[in-house]
Amino acid sequence: SAVISQKPSRDICQRGTSLTIQCQVDSQVTMMFWYRQQPGQSLTLIATANQGSEATYESGFVIDKFPISRPNLTFSTLTVSNMSPEDSSIYLCSVSRDWSGEQYFGPGTRLTVT
Amino acid sequence: DAKTTQPNSMESNEEEPVHLPCNHSTISGTDYIHWYRQLPSQGPEYVIHGLTSNVNNRMASLAIAEDRKSSTLILHRATLRDAAVYYCILLSGSARQLTFGSGTQLTVLP
């Protein structure tokens, strides 16, 4: 297993601004993922964070809105850009040894956009 | 995309077994079946996963139908701490697809 921390744990932001969420893992991992969980809903995969290259985005998510960095095997950031109230969600990162293996999730970042 | 279907909610009595079903009729040969659970205000927690054969670990058992179009997560003795939303998801290593279902809210009654 892996221990994952996220910063901030929660934030309230004004529309039009941007927020960067950090994900730190206590050991080197191959795969890192970013998810969004809207209130009362299931999880939706935003993208796979690739070390040293551009992230791989799922349908409906674009780099301009959700830029992702992954400078090394233990750290990644997700930025939510030009926020609107519709971006109010919990954002979670997860890690895995490989694509089909078990994933370990961080505690999430609760974002409210006013 | 391969999708999963789960009941919205289930109830169980404490210390009794719980069988949580999941249908995935469009599963492909390379899709792994994963189960996670999420307690309120926490990130999901890995429970178990499998490909074709039944799997057991310290938390639960996973029974996979012979045609792989459905699976069942078995909690052998439910405790109050098992009350959570349980998600059945398919991970396609070849297609690089991952789809979370809507989840089952499990209530455990004392």
Image: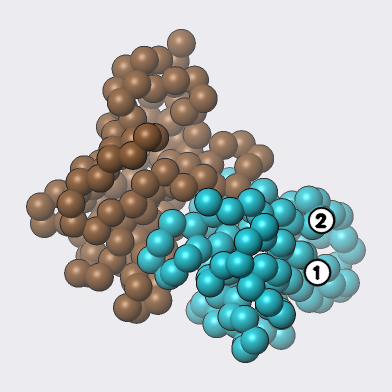
Report x, y in % for residue A50. Answer: 59, 80
**Residue located at (79% from left, 57% from top):** A7
* Residue A56 falls left or right of residue B56: right
Secondary element at tag 1: strand
Q: Residue furthest front?
A: A27
In the picture of the structure, the residue carrying the numbered disc 1 is A20
Q: Quadrant of the C terminus of chain A?
A: bottom right
The answer to which of A113 and A109 lies nearer the viewer is A109
Chain shaded brown: B
**Residue located at (39% from left, 22% from top):** B78
Q: Residue furthest top?
A: B110
Report x, y in % for residue B27. Answer: 23, 64
User: The disc labelled 2 sits on which kind of residue?
Assistant: Pro
In the picture of the structure, the residue carrying the numbered disc 2 is A8
* Residue A31 falls left or right of residue B40: left
Secondary element at tag 2: loop
Q: Residues within 10 Å of mark 1 (few under 14, many from 20)?
A: some
* Quadrant of the image occupied by residue B25: bottom left
Q: Is residue A90 visible?
A: no
Mark linked to residue B91: none
**Residue located at (64% from left, 86% from top):** A52
Distance in Å between CA atoms under marks 2 and 1: 9 Å
* Quadrant of the image occupied by residue B94: bottom left
Chain to which mark 1 belongs:
A
User: The disc labelled 1 sits on which kind of residue?
Assistant: Thr
